[in-house]
Structure formats: structure tokens, C-alpha cells
Amino acid sequence: DFLWSVLCVVLGAVLVRLYDSVVGKAPQPEKRQEKSEEKCAPVESKYSFMLDEKTFESRVRERHVAGEPCVLDVCEKNILHYRQGQFDLIFEDLQEIGLPPFMVDFFRCLLIARGASKAFVMRRELVNYKKVLYHMVHQYESLSDELGRFLSLFYASHRQVSESKKAGHSILHRELATMRGALNILKDARGWTKQICCVPRFPTPEYKQMFLAGDTGVWCKPDGMICQLLLTHFQGVVNQSTDKMRAIIEEEGWPLKPELPGQRIKCRICKHDYSKAWVHNYVCWKCDDNIRSTGKCPYERDNPASICPHTKKCFSCQMVSCSECGLVRGDGPLVRELIAELKPDFVFFDFDHTLCSTKAGAQPLVTKHGLNSDLFKVLTTHPNVHIITRQNVRHKVFLKSFVDFHVQMNGIDLATCNYTIHCLGQTKPKVTKSDVMISIMGTDGSKSAIFVDDTVREHIAPEILTIKNLNRILFSTNDYSVRAPPGTPQPLPPLTDIEEAVKETQEKETQKEKAQEKETQEKEETQEKEDAQEKEDVQEKETQEKNTQEKENTQEKERESLDNTQESKETVPSGEKVEEVTPSDNVEEVASSADKDGEEAATDKVEEIASSVEEVVSSVEKNGE
């Protein structure tokens, strides 16, 4: 009410000033001007209370509604002394302080257009619904007690019960079980409806939101809901039945016999026909279970590993969220809610089908595409927003001009928007979204961030999972209401941005050419080294072969000389003197060839020939004897 009063003051002052300016500038005769001044005087005195804060406050306190405190004194202690729940109370207060009827009508139209009238109607309906549930709970409890008394007759020990009556007993027991289940649901609905109606009238920072949900899932609900307890129980029953089903299939084989009648559908994985009851989305129960057991989704293209290890459900096709995995599925309001609650240091957006309605890397057009209203609000208010997209790097200037155009179109100063666009398409070396996030956040985990993307593969990438303090939101929405009016021409990027983009492209091409030249030079140097090494290896091999051949020739000559000497000794007649052959004679001959074969080879050969010569001499002496 205080805010409405202040707004009335401002509007009244504006109207008075406008009226004075119009009357003062009108070229009229002196008599008419005197009459206009006479008419203007009471107007100024009538609404003069709106021109001064103290005067306005004193007037409001004098003319406030009787029977309750002044609205300017509202606080947590006296909030219960004010009337509430009616839309007309607002206009009653506005009329009491003396606002003219046309201003009151303006405020009425304003509040109706902004949904205030609907909010009052919804609150009234909710209160009445709570009362209806209260009476229905009592009626169900009464009927349950009556039916329980009827069933007690069947348990009397002295009364003989026929078979027909036993059948009636089972029917009544089933009806009683259904009634008690419905009674639990009614109590649950009535209890939480009462909690909603008991939300504090005075806003306090201690109040915590009880429910948070959207079209894509539930993200916050209070503990102790009977519906949630029943859901958990039935989920356990389904899990036990699934385990029994696996055991039966392992024992009897698949498909189970007898097969169910009805339409038969072919499984797109195993290519067999099954009854309609066993096939969902052209995948049979067995194939579905086998693929899910590996952590992959059986319905998404290429079977991504999008199965939550805690809930055993798919993030994409079953629209689940998991706080333990740090991945939730939501829309724009959820993003704003989490940003307000977590207060992250950085916010990372995808562009295609997340911030903008573009798809598959298409360049945005103002006549065709729009921006999501909630993410656009975050982009213009959060101090550190980064748009990371796989669009071509050459589209960066067009994406920036598209976003800047919508920012200016909504009357927002570009200087207050702090966002950066990162285009990863056609970049060399290849850069991933995780690389950009790590370069911004660091690896120590001291900074927190929220990552918003519409593709589940981006969220489950191994590189993304290693980033600390990163909350992921699988985005899904059809709200792209921030659009330009029809016929708006396509904005062109500023020449400076185009020049920078061209310069950046030229620099990248230059760097690419230099890298190619460097790589070619390195290859040539490597090839030259390999050729030189190969030449050295060939020369060394030829030298070794030459030395080996010379050694073999020398050995052959030595063998021939030894054989000739032995033959000459054997042909000498008895009685003739045999010239004594000493090792030194052959040693001198071998030593003369040492210069050619080398000192080491000559030494080895000398020792070898010396030993052979001694053997020849000893044999010759024996023959002589």
C-alpha cells in the first residue's frame, strides 16, 4: 500500500505539471487566461498533498480506513489487523486518500493486466478448496468406520459363514482398501493446501519455498508427502518384480510362453516380433533392460550414457532430475530460481535452442528467431555470463549484433550487460566447451557456475563431469517471446566488429600458414637427418664388408702358403738336410701385412700363424727322424 501511495504521488505530480505547462503555453486572450488561472488554482490546491511527502503522509493517516491501523504502519506484529483477500480493498484505499476516479480506474486496469485480479481469485478458490477437502476427509472417515463394522460380522466365531457370504466379504474388503487409500490422498492434499494458505502475510527472509516444479519435472517438494511415500513404495514393488522377471527369463528364455494375443510389433534392435504389451517405442522389454543395465538410453540416437545411476532413469527421454548427479531438467523459471538461490560466480549458456530459437548452427535472423525471456533476463542482470556455442567462429559478430539489438530494443544499456560469446566451430586446434569453462573457472574448485544446455550429450561428456562446483541444467522450453516487431530489418554488425573479425581470421590464417611452414621445415630437416644417417650406415656397412673381404683373402693366402710348405717337406729325400723353419720367418711375413689389416687383426693372425708354424716344425722333425 505504501508503494501504491508513493506511485500515486508521482503520477499526481506529473499530471499537475503537465496541466500547468499546457495552460501556461496556450496562446489565449487575457480574459480567457484569467479564467484558466481561476480554474487551475483549485486544481493545484486539491492535489497539492501529492507534491510533498510529509503532506501526503499526514493526509493518508487522517483519511485511512476506520477500524484498522494505517497502511503506512504495517509490520509483522500488526499484519493480522488488516483486512485481506479482496481485490476491491486496494481501490477503496486509493479513493480514501482523495485520488480522482480516472486515476483509480487506471490502477484497476493496470492490476488486472498484470494478473493481480487473477491472483486474488486463485487465492479465494484455494481457500474454498481446502475447506471442501476438510469436509470430504470427515465423510470418508465416517464411511470407512461404517464399512469396517460391517466387515467385523464375518469374523464372529459363533456365526457360520457360507461360501457366498465369504465372496461378499472379499468384495467389501477390497472396497474398504480402496476407500482408505483415497482417504490418505485426501488428507495429504488437504494438509499441504492448508500449508499453502498459511504462508506468512508479511514477507520474511526465513520463509523457504515449499514447491518448485514446471512442465519438465519437479525440483522441490516438502518431505513427508503421503503421495511421495506411496510412490516410493510402489517403485520398490516394481523393482522387485523386475528382478523376478529377469530370473524367469533366464530360466525359461525369451520371449516368455505363452505369448500374449493381439497386435505384434517388431523390435528395432533384435529384429524379432513381440506382442504389443512387451514393446515400447519399437524396443522390446529384454533389449530395453539389457541396454539400460549398461547405463545407456535405448531410445536416444547412438544410445548415449544418459541413465542416472541412482534413479535408473534417463535424463533425456524420461525427464528426470538427480541432485546427487548435479543434473536437473528444467526451463527458464528454474534457471532463474537456481541462480537466485545458489548465486554462482559464472553462468554458461548454449546458444542454439537454449538462449535462442536457432537450430543446428544457423545464423540468427530478427524476423524469424527470438530469445528466451528468462535467460535474456539473466543475461542482462548477471555480472558474468558466457555464451558457449558450437556455431562457426565466423558467426560470432552476427550473434553479438543479434543479442545487442534485442538488448537495446528492450531499453537496456549495453554498458550494463557483461556477457561474452565463444564460438567453437571450425577452430584449430579443436576446442571443447569444457576447455572454455576450465580456462574461466580454474581447476581448484573455488568458483561455482551453472551450465545451461539443451543437449544431454554435452552434460554427460567426461570432460564436463570433472569440473568442480558446476551445476548442470538440461534446458527444455518453447518460450522464445523476446522478438523484434515484424518487418524489422536485419541488424548488421558494426564495422569495427567486422574489421576485428576479419583481422582475427587473417591472424589465424597467418598462424596456420606459419604452423604449416614450420611443420614442413621440420619434416625436411628430419628427412635430411634420416638421409645422412642412412648414407653413414651404408658407408660403414661397405667399410665393414671391405675389411671382412680383406681378412678372408689374407687367411686364404696364409692357408695356401702353409699347404705349400707342408708339401715341400713331405717330398724331401731321406738323408738330406731340411732347412729349419722358425716361427719368426712367418711372423715377419705376417707382420708386413699388419699395416693393411690393422694392428689388432695382425696380432691375432700372428699368434694364429705362430702356433700353426710350430706344429709344422714339430711334424717335420719327426719325419726327418
Image (spheres, rainbow, N blue to C red):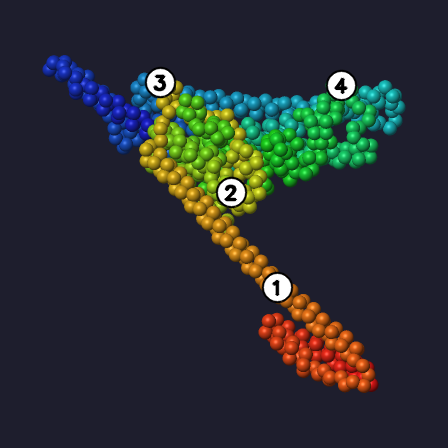
The circle on residue 434 is 2
Q: Which is nearer the N-term, disc 3 or disc 4?
A: 3
Image spot of residue 493 (x, y percent): 35, 31
Specify few, some or many for label 2: CA neighbours under 10 Å numbering under 14, 14-19, or 20 or more. Answer: some
Residue nearest the observer in this picture, 139 or 580: 580
The circle on residue 546 is 1
Q: Which is nearer the N-term, disc 3 or disc 2?
A: 3
The residue tagged with tag 3: helix, strand or loop?
helix
State how many labels appear: 4
Q: Residue at x 66, y 70 (%)?
A: 554
**Left or right placement of residue 469 versus residue 510 in this view:** right
Determine the CA span between mark 2 and mark 4: 50 Å
Q: Is residue 357 above or below residue 296?
A: above
For this orientation, the residue located farthest to the left is 30
The residue tagged with tag 2: helix, strand or loop?
helix
The residue tagged with tag 4: helix, strand or loop?
loop
The residue tagged with tag 1: helix, strand or loop?
helix
Residue nearest the observer in this picture, 475 or 487: 487
Please state, as top left, top right, bottom left or bottom right, where the N terminus lies in the image.
top left
Can you identify the residue that label 4 sits on? 262
> What kind of residue is marked 4?
Gly
Q: Which is nearer the N-term, disc 4 or disc 1?
A: 4
The reply to whether residue 71 is visible in this rendering is no
Q: Nearer the viewer, mark 3 or mark 2?
A: 2
Can you identify the residue that label 3 sits on? 105
